[in-house]
């Protein structure tokens, strides 16, 4: 198995520190890691961000779309349905409240614990 993305980011950062050109970094990554190497685009983005002063090698946080379906009202309604009938299935809750099965699952397992 190849190296993790984090390990490869460390290698890219090191090669930038020793003034290795971008194209050479990519070619060396392909030679060393074989089929498990970071793609050319990923190496180019890392090269650019490290040259611009990025210090961390871990993933940067990504923006997440606000969840407008899971509200206090929907959580309370799902909770009430479960308390009324403990054998109710998530698909029944989903149909009755017009919520997706994934949303009901998230409410049950993350918000009602």
Image (spheres, grey):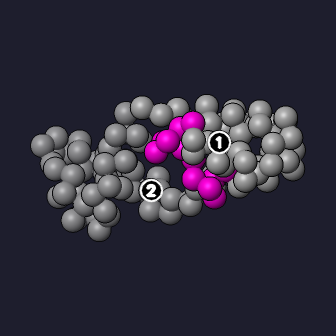
Residue under numbered circle 1: 28
Answer few, some or many: residues within 10 Å of disc 2's Cα (few below 14, many 20 plus, some between 14 and 19). Answer: some
Q: Is residue 96 visible?
A: yes
Residue at 23 percent across and 57 percent down: it is 93
Q: CA distance from mark 2 to mark 1?
A: 47 Å
Determine whether, in the image, residue 57 is placed left or right of residue 21. Answer: left
User: Which part of the image, by quadrant, shows the C terminus?
Assistant: top left
Q: Which sits in the foreground, 81 or 7?
A: 7
Say what secondary structure mark 2 lies in. loop
Residue 49 in picture, x, y percent from top left: 79, 50
Q: Which residues are magenta?
A: 32-43
Residue at 63 percent across and 58 percent down: it is 41
Q: Which sits in the foreground, 47 or 79?
A: 47
| Secondary structure mostly taken by the magenta-highlighted segment of the chain | helix
Taking the view exactly as shown, the residue that stands out farthest to the left is 87
Residue under numbered circle 2: 70
Taking the view exactly as shown, the residue that stands out farthest to the bottom is 98
Q: Is residue 54 visible?
A: no
Answer few, some or many: residues within 10 Å of disc 1's Cα (few below 14, many 20 plus, some between 14 and 19). Answer: some
Residue 13 in picture, x, y percent from top left: 76, 37
Determine whether, in the image, residue 1 is placed left or right of residue 82. Answer: right
Say what secondary structure mark 1 lies in. helix
User: Which part of the image, by quadrant, shows the N terminus?
Assistant: top left
Residue 39 in picture, x, y percent from top left: 57, 53
């Amino acid at each position: 198995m190849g190296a993790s993305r984090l390990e490869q980011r460390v290698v890219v950062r090191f090669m930038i520190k020793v003034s290795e050109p971008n194209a050479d970094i990519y070619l060396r990554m392909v030679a060393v890691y074989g089929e498990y190497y970071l793609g050319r685009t990923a190496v180019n983005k890392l090269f650019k961000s490290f040259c611009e002063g990025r210090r961390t090698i871990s993933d940067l946080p990504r923006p997440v779309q606000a969840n407008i379906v899971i509200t206090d009202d929907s959580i309370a309604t799902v909770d009430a349905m479960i308390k009324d009938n403990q054998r109710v299935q998530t698909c029944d809750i989903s149909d009755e409240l017009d919520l997706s099965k994934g949303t009901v699952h998230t409410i049950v397992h993350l918000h009602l614990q």
